[in-house]
Image: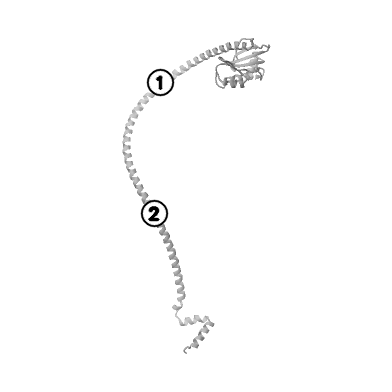
Amino acid sequence: MPFTVRDLEDLLRLLQEHPEWRRELLQALLTEDFLRLPEAFQEVSQRLADATAAIDRTGRRLEEISLQLQQLTVRVNDLAAQLQQLTARVDDLTAQVQQLTVRMNDLTARVDDLTVRLEQLTARVDDLAAQVQQLTQTLQAFMETTDRRFRRLEALIADVRGSTTEDRMRTFFYQFLADRGLRRLTPIRALHLNALGEIDGVVQVETPTGERLWVLIEAKVKLYPKDVRQFARRLRRPHVREKLHHFGIRGKALVWVFGLGLTMGVEEVAEKEAVGLVEAHIGEIVPPQVWDIGCLSPYRSRP
């Protein structure tokens, strides 16, 4: 039965009222391939989108590769320039090596010649070494003999100087004590303390007021600060005090150091140690303080 316009409108109304009929009507009217076209179109669209994304990624990668290629090109150009410079330097070094090779050959020849001469000189040095050894032994024996003679000579000179210095010290103090109004009760004598040393001059004197004092003197050719310090400290030692007491030296005393010549700093040490200081050609430079032989500590007073 053929459709009329009225029938088509009824069909459309029925399809709107029953949407599920549309699929059945399409299946009846269209082929299977035509029905699969939407799915195929969707699949093709998805593949096209994937291809477009892949193409975009490929384009970005190509841009990165192009940039890297440009950088590599610049680097290759730099390396080419460096290689050219290195090539020039290698050429220069090659020429220098050739020159050095020639010089090395010359030096080798000279070294060979010097080796021969060195061997000859070594033989001569060996001969000279033997002669030097003999001379050394002879010189050593001579020096030992000379040293023994010098030691004996120095001992003799020391004895002579010591005697001369002590003689001048005694001559000086005989007059010096008298000028100070100190009357000598004993001669000026040296006092040997055995291992404890020696006091070059010991004399007992009497003051104008009748007070008796002992005078202790150290004499040196050249007087150093250490000589003053050592003499003062020696007098303060208990064993030296006992020796002085053994010889009857007690009570108050005046201590002087006498020198034919003085060195720098002697005056300061003499004042610090409360010791009088006398130079042969000048006289008294630092007056002494009064010592107490009992305790060997100086009073803070002047004689």
Query: Which residue is drawn at the image coordinates 44% and 67% (left, top)?
Result: 52
Where residue 32 appears, as percent x and y from the top left, is 45, 79
SS type, badge 1 = helix
| Residue 124 placement (x, y as % from top left) | 35, 25
Q: Residue at x 33, y 29 (%)?
A: 117
Looking at the picture, tell me which residue is in the foreground, 12 or 287: 287
Q: Residue 146, percent across and down? A: 46, 17
**Number of numbered markers:** 2
- Which mark is in front, 2 or 1? 2
Relative to 104, say whether 34 is above or below: below
Asked if residue 141 is positioned above or below residue 76 in the image, the reply reads: above
- Callout 1: few (<14), some (14-19), or many (20+) C-alpha neighbours within 10 Å? few
Which numbered dot is residue 247?
Answer: none
Image quadrant where residue 239 sits: top right
Of residues 301 and 63, the one nearer the viewer is: 301
Task: Please name the residue that numbered disc 2 is placed on.
Answer: 74
Is residue 127 rendered to the left or right of residue 158? Answer: left
The image's mark for residue 135 is: 1
* Residue at point 45%, 74% (across, down): 41
Q: Is residue 183 above or below residue 15?
A: above
Quarter-of-image position of residue 269: top right
Q: Quadrant of the C terminus?
A: top right
Taking the spot 38% from the left edge, 51% from the top edge, the residue there is: 79
Q: Is residue 262 left or right of residue 129?
A: right
Q: Position of residue 142 (x, y in %)?
A: 44, 18
The answer to whether residue 63 of the structure is visible from this angle is yes
Q: Quadrant of residue 281?
A: top right
| Separation (CA) of disc 2 from disc 1 | 80 Å
Name the N-terminal-most of marks 2 and 1: 2
Q: At label 1, which amino acid type do we have?
A: Leu
